[in-house]
């Protein structure tokens, strides 16, 4: 019944920051996080209001390609096909950087524009959020709570943060506007009966844009280093997206003797409307810098342009480029060509616009029912058991399967799909657990629980099966010497033209790439069991051990079943090739969404916990775990992660998430002179990565059998001192330090070569250095 509030400011800047572990400063770094809260009565004891607001303003300049890469290039101002040889380019990362920068500044790139790819990249964050809430004690039996959330953000150059990416290889997140309205109504029907009703309406307007819409398409080349330029493939040049959801649920609780029953249900309706302009101008992936330069320099001379053939020596280093009818120099052999992959999505005929091909409006309906009981069998023993049922109903195809490019395949039992996304209406999830206070003395507690948990399928994965059907949208795939749309691969930086369908294929393109869901698809399911034992050591301190076993089945995997029946293992390479007739010759690549992947996690945690007493509290724990699976890809429908479709068992290995060792420590203490302090330590071991190449001398080196250099350790602390101004106001300055010992903490989320990365966000390189943060908080 009094007005209370607070205000805060957290500040970090370059002057309070050490250089990163590779000796580079956080140039022009500045971070401001600020906001406040306030609340009080509208009607005493009856109606109350609360509000808060928060903002973030951050800037950071990365040098990227504006600074040299390693040793100096022996050629001053190198220009491709002029004053530097291919061998000199291949032998020096710095020569590659300079040659590429000169190329993008001066080469004819119509219809794209030339760009200075060597400018520093300014990463900015502009976020603001507001929250308001009203609490109404309607009467003794009814309480109603309503709230409104609003979030606004615009974040230029927050898509990629990779040192070898050019200035144009980035995007702008926003300006997004995210809003949500929540209503909760609690009704006490009697001392033993309680009802909780909830309603949410959320609306998210989330546009994204490329940083430079006049730049070349998404273009990457080389394995070490990997360079990347142009519009990100998923922002060519913008995405318009509107997402909204309505959530209604109700829970009813009933107490009967030693039982506390609870049951209820939920209805969630969500809809996503967008124009996804992904791959509209294509994505180019090249084997090397020299390979790209030969391909992109279309001079009409043999060894240049889209028909160039790459000749590699015994170490797989390109040594020459020749025409398709020429012979490689002695000591080298053709590797197929510099264009590893070209992808393009778009219309199926000249009468369709790009935006029409990328438009989607899909909805999901999700239902849930549950019943559970908390049974106090004895004073020292409690059992929880229950059953939850969920269903996820997916959108129907906009174009009936009988009218798609794969319509003639639906009657073939071997075709993997029925043309729809199978609804999952059988997600039954029983769960049981207990808590045993051994001896009833509150000194030893044994807890255990086990159950089944299902996951929902995301809309990003769904939309491809709705739009990429060969009628609304087709996928065009090209490599050196092959183009699924016919003819040669496109001339850089152009796209493959969409001609009228040939009479033999009309009304569809010939061999279009399509996306489908397997006819036996099911949502992911997790079986999990946890057992924990906690023992009091002294009155305020306990030790505990915790074991978790979790098995995942029906996990999502993307495969292409439209390949020949015989796999050919490369002598040196990452994936098998396939020979023989393909099963569905009227189609190109088929992205089939299946649920055949599996996982297994086992982990044990040992810890000590001291609750707050005698002016301090402490908790520390160590976890040893093993995390296995045969496909860690959950949200990337553009990548086939397996090495050999006909030997998926070889994919079972360490998961991308696997961190064998984890350590956490936290303490808070009230110190002398009115100070309070906290210390936090966190560490984990390195994550796995697949050897490159995966097949070496014809032998599969295995998936995720090596470890990245991304082990992590941080030591953080904070010190604060409150100053009282009267009875109601406090000013609390605080000093915080992060990564005190300036550990390198390399950031590397990749599990496969960066050249083939299809993530929508990527940061790679050294981690955050030692940083000091100054904070001020005011309460009243």
Image (cartoon, rainbow, N blue to C red):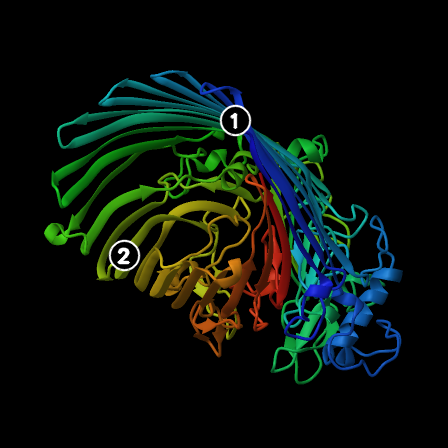
Where residue 415 sits: x, y (%)? Answer: 41, 42
610 vs 731, nearest the viewer: 731
Q: Is residue 78 above or below residue 485?
A: below
**Does residue 47 appear anywhere in the picture?**
yes
Q: How many discs appear?
A: 2
Question: What residue would you read off at disc 1?
Answer: 147
Name the side, left or right, on which 377 lies relative to 596: left
**Secondary structure category for the residue under label 1:** strand
In front: 665, or 398?
Answer: 665
| Residue that appears at 13% across and 32% down | 258
Measure the alpha-carbon separation of dots 2 and 1. 39 Å
The local crowd at label 2, few if under 14, some if 14 to 19, many if 20 or more residues have their Cα within 10 Å, is some
Which residue is at the far front?
Answer: 726
Foreground tag (2 vs 1)? 1
Q: Earlier in the sequence, mark 2 or mark 1?
A: 1
Foreground pick, 375 / 263: 375
Mark linked to residue 549: 2
Left or right of 50: which side holds 329?
right
Residue 230, given in percent of the width and then of the height, sits at 74, 54
Up-down relation of residue 220 to residue 23 (above or below): above
SS at mark 2 in the image = strand
- Front one among 224 and 541: 541
Question: Is 559 placed left or right of 39 in the picture?
Answer: left
Percent position of residue 225, x then y: 67, 71
* Residue 410 quadrant: top left
- Does any portion of residue 50 appear in the rendered image? no
Give the position of the C terminus as an image quadrant: top right
């Amino acid at each position: 019944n009094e007005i209370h509030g607070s205000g805060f400011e957290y500040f970090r800047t370059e002057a309070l920051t050490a250089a990163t572990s590779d000796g580079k400063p956080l140039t022009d770094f500045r971070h401001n996080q600020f906001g406040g809260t306030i609340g009080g009565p509208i009607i005493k004891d009856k109606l109350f209001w609360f509000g808060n607001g928060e903002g973030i303003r951050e800037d950071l300049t990365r040098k990227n390609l504006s600074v040299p890469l390693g040793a100096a290039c022996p050629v001053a101002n190198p220009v491709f096909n002029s004053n530097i040889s291919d061998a000199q380019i291949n032998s020096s990362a710095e020569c590659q950087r300079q040659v590429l920068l000169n190329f993008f500044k001066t080469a004819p790139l119509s219809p794209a524009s030339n760009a200075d790819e060597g400018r520093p990249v300014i990463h900015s964050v502009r976020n603001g959020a507001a929250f308001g809430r009203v609490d109404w004690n309607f009467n003794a039996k009814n309480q109603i709570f309503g709230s409104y959330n609003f979030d606004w953000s615009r974040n230029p150059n927050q898509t990629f943060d990779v040192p070898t990416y050019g200035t144009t290889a980035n995007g702008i997140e926003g300006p997004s506007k995210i809003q949500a309205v929540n209503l909760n109504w609690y009704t006490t029907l009697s001392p033993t009966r309680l009802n909780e009703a909830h309603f949410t309406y959320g609306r998210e307007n989330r546009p994204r844009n490329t940083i430079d819409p006049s730049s070349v398409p998404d273009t990457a080349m080389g394995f070490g280093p990997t360079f990347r330029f142009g519009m990100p493939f998923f922002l060519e040049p913008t995405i318009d997206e509107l997402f909204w959801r309505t959530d209604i649920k109700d829970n009813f609780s009933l107490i009967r003797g030693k039982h506390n029953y609870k049951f209820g249900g939920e209805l969630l309706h969500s809809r996503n409307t967008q124009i996804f302009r992904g791959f509209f101008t294509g994505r180019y992936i090249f084997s090397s810098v020299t390979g790209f330069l030969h391909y992109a320099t279309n001079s009409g001379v043999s060894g240049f342009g889209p028909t160039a053939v790459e000749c590699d020596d015994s170490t797989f280093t390109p040594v020459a480029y020749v025409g398709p009818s020429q012979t490689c120099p002695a000591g080298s052999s053709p590797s197929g060509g510099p264009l590893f992959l070209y992808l393009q999505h778009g219309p199926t005929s000249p009468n369709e616009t790009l935006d029409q091909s990328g438009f989607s409006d899909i909805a999901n309906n999700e239902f849930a029912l549950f019943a559970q009981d908390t049974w106090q069998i004895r004073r020292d023993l409690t059992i929880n058991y229950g059953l939850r049922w969920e269903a996820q109903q997916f959108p129907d195809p906009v174009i009936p399967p009988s009218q798609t490019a794969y319509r003639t395949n639906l009657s073939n039992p071997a075709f993997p799909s029925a043309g729809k996304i199978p609804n999952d209406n059988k997600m039954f999830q029983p769960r049981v657990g207990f808590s045993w206070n051994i001896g009833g003395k509150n000194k030893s507690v044994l807890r255990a629980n086990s159950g089944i948990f299902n996951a929902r399928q995301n809309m990003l994965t769904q939309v491809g099966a709705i739009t990429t059907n060969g009628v609304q949208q087709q996928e065009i795939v090209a490599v050196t010497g092959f183009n699924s749309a016919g003819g040669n691969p496109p001339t850089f930086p152009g796209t493959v033209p969409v001609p009228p369908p040939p009479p033999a294929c009309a009304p569809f393109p010939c061999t279009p790439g399509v996306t489908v869901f397997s006819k036996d698809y099911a949502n992911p399911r997790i079986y999990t069991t946890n057992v924990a034992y906690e023992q009091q050591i002294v009155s305020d301190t306990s030790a505990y051990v915790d074991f978790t076993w979790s098995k995942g089945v029906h996990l999502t995997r993307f495969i292409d079943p439209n390949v020949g029946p015989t796999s050919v293992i490369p002598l040196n390479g990452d994936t098998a090739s396939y020979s023989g007739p393909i099963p569905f010759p009227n189609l190109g690549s088929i992205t089939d969404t299946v649920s055949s992947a599996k996982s297994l996690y086992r982990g044990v945690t040992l810890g000590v916990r001291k609750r707050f007493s005698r002016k301090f509290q402490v908790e520390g724990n160590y976890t040893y775990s093993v995390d296995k699976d045969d496909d860690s890809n959950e949200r990337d429908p553009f990548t086939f992660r397996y090495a050999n479709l006909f030997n998926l068992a070889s994919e079972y290995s360490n998961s991308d998430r696997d961190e064998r060792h984890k350590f956490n420590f936290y303490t808070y203490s009230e110190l002398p002179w009115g100070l309070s302090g906290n210390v936090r330590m966190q560490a984990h071991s390195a994550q796995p990565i697949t050897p490159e190449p995966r097949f070496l001398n014809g032998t599969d080196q295995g998936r995720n059998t090596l470890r990245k250099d991304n082990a992590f350790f941080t030591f953080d602390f904070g010190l604060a001192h409150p100053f009282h101004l009267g009875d109601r106001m406090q000013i609390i300055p605080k000093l915080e330090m992060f990564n005190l010992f300036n550990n390198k903490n390399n950031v590397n989320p990749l599990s496969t070569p960066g050249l083939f990365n299809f993530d929508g966000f990527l940061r790679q390189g050294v981690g955050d250095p030692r940083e000091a943060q100054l904070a001020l908080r005011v309460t009243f």
